[in-house]
C-alpha cells in the first residue's frame, strides 16, 4: 500500500498529538513535515528526534522544504486567524487542507455524519472539539425526528486549553452553533464551552439538549437506538468516546418557556432529549483528560485516511 505524505502546521499540543497519531497508528499516511514558528517548541524537537523534517519559519518555511512537492495533505492546527493566512498562501499549490481551527473556510466535516460528502473539497473544516463530540448526537436524533432546537455544552479541563483554544473562544461558539444546524440538522443551534479549572483536571464532558415534537413512546425508543449506534460509530475512531448515562427523554412542562429558543414558524415541542457524554483521550501525547484535543486529532486523522483511501481507488 502506498502512503500519502502529510504536513502539520502548528507544533503545539494539537499538532504534536496529531503527528504522534500519524506516526504510530496510520498505515496510509506518512509524515512529510512539522511546521512551527517557535524553534524551541517541544513539538518541533520531538519531530526532529523522530526523523520528521521541520521548519520554524511557518508556511514560508514549509514551501522552502525540499520535500514540499511530495506533500499532498496539510493539517492546520494553529488558530482561526492564522488559518486564513495559511490557506491563502497554500492555495496556489493545490494541497488538500484539513483545518483543525474554527476558521470555517471550507465545509464542516464530522466523520461519523458526513465524511464522504466532502472528499473532493480543497479545504475541509473539522468544526471544534465540542462539535466533534456533540453534533453526531444531534444528527442521530434528527434522522429520527425533526429537531427544533439543539444546545450543546462542552466542559473541558482548563489545563487542556492552550493559547490557540483560548484565542478562539468566540469562533468556537459561532462555528459550533452553525454546524449544529448545517451538519446536525437542527433548526436552531447554540454552543457553550466551559473551561473547568478543577484539580486534578477532569476529562471532557459534553451535554446535548434537543427539543423535539414526538409524543409517541415508540419514537423515543428509535431515538435512543439511533443515539447509541452513533456513539458506537464515533467510538470507532475516538476510543474514549462514550455515553455517560442512558439517553433521557422527558416531557416539556406546559409552563416551560421554550418559545424564546424557537423560530417563529416552529410548533411548540413536546419533549426534551438529554444526552450526556464523556471523552477520554488516548494519551498518545496529551494527558488522558485532554479528550477535547484527542477527538479533534482523531477526527482529522480519520478525514485524511479517507481522502488517502479514495485516492487509491481512483488510481
Image: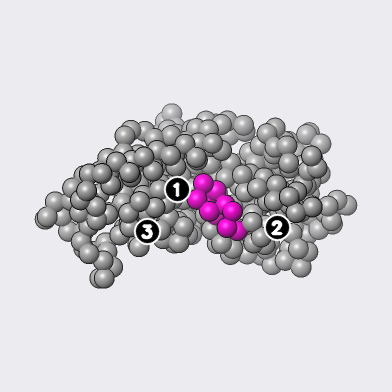
Q: Which residues are magenta?
A: 109-118
Which residue is pictured at 30% across the width and 59% down the height?
148
Which residue in the protein does label 2 denote?
96
Residue placed most toward the observer, 257 or 52: 257
Task: Indicate the position of residue 238 as horizontal and vertical percent values.
Answer: 53, 37
Q: Earlier in the sequence, mark 1 or mark 3?
A: 1
Q: Are marks 1 and 3 in contact (CB under 8 Å)?
A: no
Residue placed most toward the observer, 155 or 267: 267
Q: Nearer the viewer, mark 2 or mark 1?
A: 1
CA gap, disc 2 and disc 1: 24 Å
For the rendered model, the colour scheme is one colour
Q: Which corner quadrant of the image does residue 187 belong to?
A: bottom left
Which residue is pictured at 85% across the width and 51% down the height?
67
Which residue in the protein does label 1 denote?
136
Q: Considering the numbered disc 1 on the image, is that residue within a helix, a strand or a loop?
A: helix
Q: Main secondary structure of the magenta part?
A: helix
Which residue in the protein does label 3 denote?
186
Residue placed most toward the observer, 254 or 306: 306
Magenta stretch contains residue 112:
yes
| 62 relative to 99 in the view: left or right | right
Q: How many marks?
A: 3
Q: Earlier in the sequence, mark 2 or mark 3?
A: 2
Amino acid at each position: 500500500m502506498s502512503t500519502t505524505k502529510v504536513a502539520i502546521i502548528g507544533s503545539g499540543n494539537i499538532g504534536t498529538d496529531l503527528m504522534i497519531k500519524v506516526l504510530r497508528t496510520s498505515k496510509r499516511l506518512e509524515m512529510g513535515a512539522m511546521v512551527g514558528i517557535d524553534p524551541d517548541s517541544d513539538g518541533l524537537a520531538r519531530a526532529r528526534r523522530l526523523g520528521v523534517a521541520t521548519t520554524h519559519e511557518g508556511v514560508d518555511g514549509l514551501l522552502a522544504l525540499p520535500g514540499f512537492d511530495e506533500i499532498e495533505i496539510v493539517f492546520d492546527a494553529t488558530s482561526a486567524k492564522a488559518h486564513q493566512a495559511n490557506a491563502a498562501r497554500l492555495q496556489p499549490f493545490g494541497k488538500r487542507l484539513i483545518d483543525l481551527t474554527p476558521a470555517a473556510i471550507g465545509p464542516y466535516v464530522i466523520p461519523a455524519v458526513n465524511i464522504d460528502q466532502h472528499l473532493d473539497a480543497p479545504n475541509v473544516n473539522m468544526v471544534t472539539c465540542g462539535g466533534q463530540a456533540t453534533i453526531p448526537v444531534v444528527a442521530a436524533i434528527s434522522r429520527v425526528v425533526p429537531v427544533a432546537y439543539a444546545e450543546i455544552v462542552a466542559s473541558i479541563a482548563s489545563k487542556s486549553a492552550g493559547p490557540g483554544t483560548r484565542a478562539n473562544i468566540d469562533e468556537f461558539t459561532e462555528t459550533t452553533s452553525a454546524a449544529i444546524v448545517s451538519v446536525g440538522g437542527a433548526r436552531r443551534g447554540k454552543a457553550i464551552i466551559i473551561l473547568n479549572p478543577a484539580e486534578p483536571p477532569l476529562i471532557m464532558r459534553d451535554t446535548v439538549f434537543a427539543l423535539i415534537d414526538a409524543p409517541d413512546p415508540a419514537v423515543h425508543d428509535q431515538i435512543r437506538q439511533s443515539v447509541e449506534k452513533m456513539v458506537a460509530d464515533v467510538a470507532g475512531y475516538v476510543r474514549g468516546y462514550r455515553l455517560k448515562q442512558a439517553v433521557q427523554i422527558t416531557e416539556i412542562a406546559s409552563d416551560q418557556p421554550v418559545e424564546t429558543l424557537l423560530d417563529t414558524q416552529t410548533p411548540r415541542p413536546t419533549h426534551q432529549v438529554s444526552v450526556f457524554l464523556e471523552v477520554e483521550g488516548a494519551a498518545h501525547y496529551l494527558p488522558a483528560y485532554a479528550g477535547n484535543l484527542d477527538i479533534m486529532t482523531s477526527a482529522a486523522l480519520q478525514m485524511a485516511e479517507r481522502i488517502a483511501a479514495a485516492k487509491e481507488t481512483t488510481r
